[in-house]
Amino acid sequence: MQVAYLRVPPIEAQFRTARMVAASVARQADFPAEQVEDVKLAVNEACALHRGAVAPLELVFDLEGARLEVLMGPSAAPAVAEPESQMALTILRAIVPEFEAGDNGLRLAWPGPVADA
């Protein structure tokens, strides 16, 4: 099991750092290029849900074998009236095989590389 921790301010300029770490971890799991791009997009959209938060954004990238799990907090509970947040949630539900949003934050998980991604 390999675990990487990242703690950044919840500002747009730092989302790039989160995407770079996500891509690196996905490549370590031998994800194909298209799936690496999906992981990067998912992490970016998840970060966007935290935009403007007061607390730093904390990410845990957990790679066990080929399984990649990203935990992100603190909680990101977007208001229903925020169209950008709803769009981010829609994208996350579409491209992340295992996606959960709860009181403790977000959980994004990929069971492993997909051969025809």
Image (spheres, helix red, strand yellow):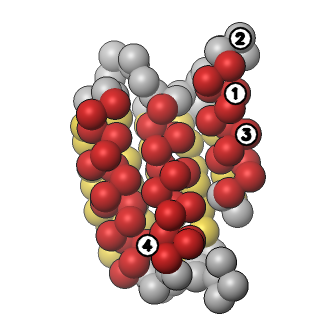
> Does the residue at mark 2 contact the one at mark 1 (Cβ under 8 Å)?
no
Q: Sequence-wise, which precedes: disc 4 or disc 3?
A: 4
**Labels 3 & 1 near each other (Cβ < 8 A):** yes
The alpha-carbon separation of the residues under discs 3 and 1 comes to: 6 Å
Above or below 64: residue 6: above
Q: CA distance from mark 1 to mark 4?
A: 26 Å
Tell me how far mark 2 sits from mark 3, CA to CA. Answer: 14 Å
Residue identified by numbered label 1:
86
Question: Secondary structure under badge 4?
Answer: helix
Q: Is residue 109 above or below residue 102?
A: below
Q: Is 77 positioned to the left or the right of 8 in the image?
A: right
Say which amino acid is labelled 1.
Gln
**Disc 3 marks which amino acid?**
Thr
What number of labels is visible? 4
Residue 81 got which mark? 2
Identify which residue, 7 or 87, lies in the foreground: 87
Q: Which mark is residue 62?
A: none
Which sits earlier in the primary sequence, circle 2 or circle 3?
Answer: 2
Residue most toward the top?
Answer: 81
Amino acid type assigned to the residue bearing label 4 in the image: Ala
Mark earlier in primary sequence (4, 2): 4
Which secondary structure, mark 1?
Answer: helix
Dot 3 corresponds to which residue?
Answer: 90
Q: Which residue is mark 4?
A: 26
Q: In what quadrant of the picture does the C terminus appear?
A: bottom right
Compute the Cα span from label 4 to label 2: 33 Å
Query: Can residue 100 be seen here?
Result: no
**Local SS, label 3:** helix
Mark 1 and mark 4 lie on one chain; the one further toward the N terminus is 4
At label 2, which amino acid type do we have?
Ala
